[in-house]
Image: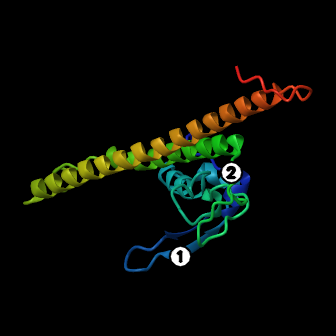
């Protein structure tokens, strides 16, 4: 097999699936539970099985799962909830490098997610696939319309997701610029005269 679907040794150890072999002539097929694979066993799998397992176990397979710890936002001290007061207290830490890392991680996972979703867009159903049976044209019409609607919906989600990634990067840049400007202003203060140079 080619290198299109590749799992690391660590990922291969986590692979689990059930396959059925034999059977026929009224005899039920034998059930085989697979727990972990070696690289050679992976290479011997058919492409359709590699594709299925790759999307399930590859890096980024957790993309879009809101409750996965890997998708958690970076936090500093948790702010106190309740009544708002004028006095500022410890809240969220702003770390431009962490924001950029989060944005890059989101983009990476989005790209993997898009590859998975694009499989739907690449699927075409024809009346021939349905044996040209009566009513197959109606089914193809509904399936095509559903696929088109699904792709439009996914496109809207992708646009919103990219907007969040852009905001994270812009926030990191703005915070860094503000921090640098503040540091420069503070550095320009002459402690001898007490008069800041604000030009």
How many residues crowd around disc 2 within 10 Å: few (fewer than 14), some, or many (20 or more)?
few
Looking at the image, residue 170 sits to the left or right of residue 78; the answer is left
The CA distance from mark 2 to mark 1 is 22 Å
Q: Which mark is residue 150?
A: none
Q: Which residue is mark 2?
A: 40
Q: Position of residue 186 (x, y in %)?
A: 79, 32
Looking at the image, residue 188 sits to the left or right of residue 66; the answer is right
What residue is rendered at 62% in x and 51% in y?
A: 59
Q: Earlier in the sequence, mark 2 or mark 1?
A: 1
What residue is rendered at 72% in x and 53% in y?
A: 9
Q: Is disc 1 placed on a helix, strand or loop?
A: strand
Looking at the image, residue 149 sits to the left or right of residue 120; the answer is left
Q: Is disc 2 placed on a helix, strand or loop?
A: helix
Q: Is residue 3 visible?
A: no
Q: Which residue is mark 1?
A: 31
Q: How is the image coloured?
A: rainbow
Which residue is outermost to the bottom? 27
Q: 118 or 102, which lies in front?
A: 102
């Amino acid at each position: 097999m080619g290198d299109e679907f590749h799992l690391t040794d660590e990922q291969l150890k986590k692979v689990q699936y059930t396959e059925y072999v034999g059977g026929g002539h009224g005899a039920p097929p034998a059930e085989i539970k697979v727990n972990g694979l070696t690289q050679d066993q992976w290479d011997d799998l058919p492409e359709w099985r590699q594709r299925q397992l790759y999307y399930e176990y590859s890096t980024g397979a957790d993309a879009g799962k809101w409750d996965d710890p890997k998708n958690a936002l970076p936090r500093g001290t948790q702010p106190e909830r309740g009544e708002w007061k004028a006095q500022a207290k410890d809240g969220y830490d702003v770390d431009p490098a962490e924001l950029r890392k989060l944005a890059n991680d989101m983009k990476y996972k989005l790209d993997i997610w898009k590859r998975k979703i694009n499989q739907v867009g690449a699927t075409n159903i024809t009346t021939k696939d349905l044996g040209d049976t009566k009513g197959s044209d109606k089914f193809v019409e509904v399936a095509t319309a559903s696929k088109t609607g699904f792709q439009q919906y996914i496109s809207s989600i992708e646009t919103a997701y990219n907007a969040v990634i852009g905001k994270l990067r812009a926030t990191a840049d703005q915070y860094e610029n503000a921090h640098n400007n503040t540091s420069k202003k503070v550095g320009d203060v002459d402690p001898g005269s007490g008069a800041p140079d604000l030009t």
